[in-house]
Image (spheres, grey):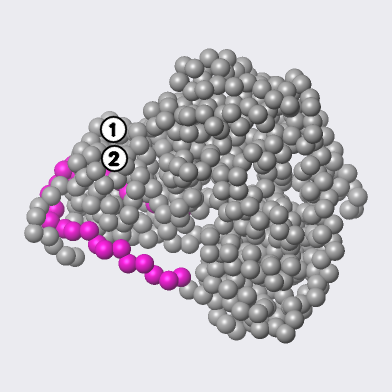
């Protein structure tokens, strides 16, 4: 390892290494045990530190940064409770494949072997929810650790990596220098295997594409659109792949992934070949769309297929997904004429789903507003490049089914770990990264209150964001699921604050809407306001049961 001419503190070296890796932001709550690191960070001035009101909010901010840029940001907490507060957001990022660096302090090495104030095995705690977790035991190892951490976090499939810096190691002297980042090109599938896959695609009668999280990488989305433009094959996406193809494209078959069958399920049923692209099994398990394990499947992803009795691909294209699609496009271009497919079933499904989306576009109700109406208006108001973030709750199911995108990474939904409390802190990060795009977070009243303290962070940063809260006074998604299974639900009701007073207390603009005709102009007003705005709507969750009945009728009709 190269040695420098000057001695410095280990914490200074850590900051230099992070700077050399292109780290732009660290979000977090400092503590006593990472004070040296914070001083080094401030003196450097090369990385922006965003002080948050809770470590969980910091982790969600770092997650959204990773999802939108493909590069890691840092989230920081001290030892003990600071580290445990980070873990939910870290687990969410890791399961949804967002690159992230988790930075925690630790007690001095001389007291880790015994019972000591706030000391716990933080590395062991993070091991199940990260790709790699380690502690710095000697300052000279910092360049290698940081270089490895960033590479592991970015490598497909991306995820979280944890670095712990004990307080005495942070103060220790070192003469080491950062290692220069060296990128590598991802492997591509063997040409012969691509030929096998293409022959299956060309010979199929009713092929369909199931697009997953891997397809929202910009190069992959571009190649996918080219493939579909030429072949006409329909694409249904998981929640996290929204926008991989333009919703206005005739081959867009909207989104699949509800816990029950939907219109898009018919297209999968009718297909004689399913091409899965960047598909994460954690989003929509194959037993829901291939219960007998008899579908012909081509798996294309950065990694080999997960072993599962309902997911047995005939061919696996393992390697860079954009390169894989480019190789398929090359073979499609060489054909004298494109394959002739029977896409009538897919066209029918798209037509039926489009009618569902527009069903309540002209609602004029008062008192409560249908979810479908809200999302129709939101789509009309937001530009293609604007960003919507969904929290977790009943509203997520409606967003998944009724809000569709023109571009990748313009609708962010946590769908692997599925943690509530994601959207408010995530919106703050999204606006930092994309100041020229409008950012709307949609939360339930349950999820919003889980990280409500970050309203102060948004005000301090003067974030031009709008947070929309769907108010129903309870945990609506749990009630919906209990009702479906038991025909009743347990006590899931709670009280809410006076929303307008809450907004005023944090220095936000505040709006409350309970009439359909008032929603769209109020949303436009909130989006035009300077600084953060809270928009609360009285939601008509009677529509949950209506949707359940409708989907039940679809299932019966297909029986």
Quarter placement of the N terminus: bottom left
Residue denoted by label 2: 105
* Closest to the observer, 433 or 312: 433
Q: Badge 2, how many Cα within 10 Å: few under 14, some, many 20+?
A: many
User: Is residue 165 located in the magenta-colored stretch of the structure?
Assistant: yes
Front position in the image: 140 or 532:
532
User: Where is 121 relative to 543, above or below?
Assistant: below
Q: Is residue 394 visible?
A: no
Local secondary structure at mark 2 = strand
Task: Tell which of 248 and 204 is nearer to you.
Answer: 248
Q: Which residues are magenta?
A: 159-186
User: In the image, what residue occupies the spot 75% across and 19% down?
Assistant: 367
In the rendering, at what x and y percent does residue 205 appear? 81, 73
Tell me: 100 left or right of 213. left
Tell me whether the residue at label 2 lies in contact with that at label 1, contact meaning CB atoms closer than 8 angstroms: yes
Residue placed at 29% from the left, 40% from the top? 105
- Choose top left, top right, bottom left or bottom right for residue 79: top left
- Label 1: element kind: loop
Left or right relative to 450: residue 237: right
Callout 1 crowding tier (Cα within 10 Å): few <14, some 14–19, many ≥20: some
Does residue 39 appear in the picture of this structure? yes
**Marks 2 and 1, the one that precedes in the sequence:** 1
Task: Find disc 1 in the rendering and name its residue.
Answer: 31
Question: Is 491 situated above or below 136?
Answer: above
Residue 184 at x, y percent in the picture: 39, 70
Q: Residue at x 36, y 57 (%)?
A: 150
**Closer to the camera, 553 or 531?**
531
């Amino acid at each position: 390892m190269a040695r420098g001419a000057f001695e410095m503190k280990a914490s200074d070296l850590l900051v230099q290494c992070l700077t050399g890796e292109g780290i732009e932001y660290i979000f977090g709550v400092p503590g006593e045990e990472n004070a040296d690191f914070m001083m080094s960070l401030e003196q450097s001035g090369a990385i922006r530190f965003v002080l948050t009101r809770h470590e969980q909010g910091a982790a969600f901010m770092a997650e959204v940064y990773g999802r939108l840029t493909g590069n890691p940001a840092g989230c920081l907490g001290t030892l003990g409770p600071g580290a445990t507060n980070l873990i939910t957001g870290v687990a969410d990022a890791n399961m949804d494949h967002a690159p992230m660096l988790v930075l925690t302090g630790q007690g001095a090495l001389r007291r880790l072997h015994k019972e000591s104030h706030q000391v716990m095995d933080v590395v062991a705690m993070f091991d199940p929810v990260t790709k790699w977790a380690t502690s710095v035991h000697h300052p000279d190892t910092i360049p290698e650790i940081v270089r490895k951490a960033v590479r592991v976090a970015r490598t497909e499939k991306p995820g979280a990596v944890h670095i712990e810096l004990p307080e005495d190691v942070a103060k220790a002297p070192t003469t080491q220098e950062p290692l220069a980042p060296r990128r590598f090109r991802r492997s591509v599938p063997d040409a012969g295997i691509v030929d096998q896959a293409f022959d299956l695609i060309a010979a199929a009668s009713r092929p369909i594409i199931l697009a997953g999280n891997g397809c929202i990488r910009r190069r992959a989305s571009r190649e996918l659109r080219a493939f579909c433009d030429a072949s006409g094959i329909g694409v249904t996406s998981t929640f996290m792949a929204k926008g991989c193809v333009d919703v206005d494209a005739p081959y867009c078959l909207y989104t699949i992934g509800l816990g029950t069958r939907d219109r898009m399920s018919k297209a999968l049923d009718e297909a004689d070949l399913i091409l899965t692209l960047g598909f994460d099994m954690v989003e929509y398990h194959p037993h829901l769309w291939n219960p007998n394990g008899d579908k012909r499947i081509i798996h294309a992803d950065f990694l080999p297929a997960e072993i599962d009795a309902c997911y047995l691909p005939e061919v696996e294209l393992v390697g860079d997904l954009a390169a894989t699609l480019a190789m398929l496009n090359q073979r499609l271009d060489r054909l004298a004429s494109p394959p002739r497919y029977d896409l009538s079933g897919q066209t029918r499904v798209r037509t039926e789903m489009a009618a569902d989306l527009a069903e309540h576009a002209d609602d004029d109700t008062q008192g409560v507003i249908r979810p479908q109406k809200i999302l129709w208006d939101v789509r009309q108001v937001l530009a293609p490049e604007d960003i919507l973030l969904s929290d977790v709750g009943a509203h997520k199911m409606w967003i998944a089914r009724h809000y569709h995108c023109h571009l990748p990474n313009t609708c962010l939904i946590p769908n692997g770990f599925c943690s509530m409390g994601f959207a408010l802190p995530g919106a703050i990060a999204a606006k930092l990264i994309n100041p020229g795009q409008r950012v709307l977070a949609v939360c339930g009243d349950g999820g919003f209150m889980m990280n409500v303290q970050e309203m102060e962070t948004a005000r301090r940063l003067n974030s031009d964001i709008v947070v929309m809260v769907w108010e129903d006074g309870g945990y609506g998604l749990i009630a919906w699921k209990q009702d479906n299974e038991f025909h009743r639900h347990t006590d899931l009701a709670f009280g809410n604050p006076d929303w307008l007073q809450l907004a005023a207390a944090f220095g936000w603009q505040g709006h409350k809407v309970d009439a359909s005709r008032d929603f769209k102009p109020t949303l436009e007003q909130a989006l035009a306001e300077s600084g953060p705005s809270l928009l609360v709507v009285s939601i008509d969750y009677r529509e949950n049961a209506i949707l359940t009945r409708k989907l039940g009728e679809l299932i019966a009709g297909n029986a």
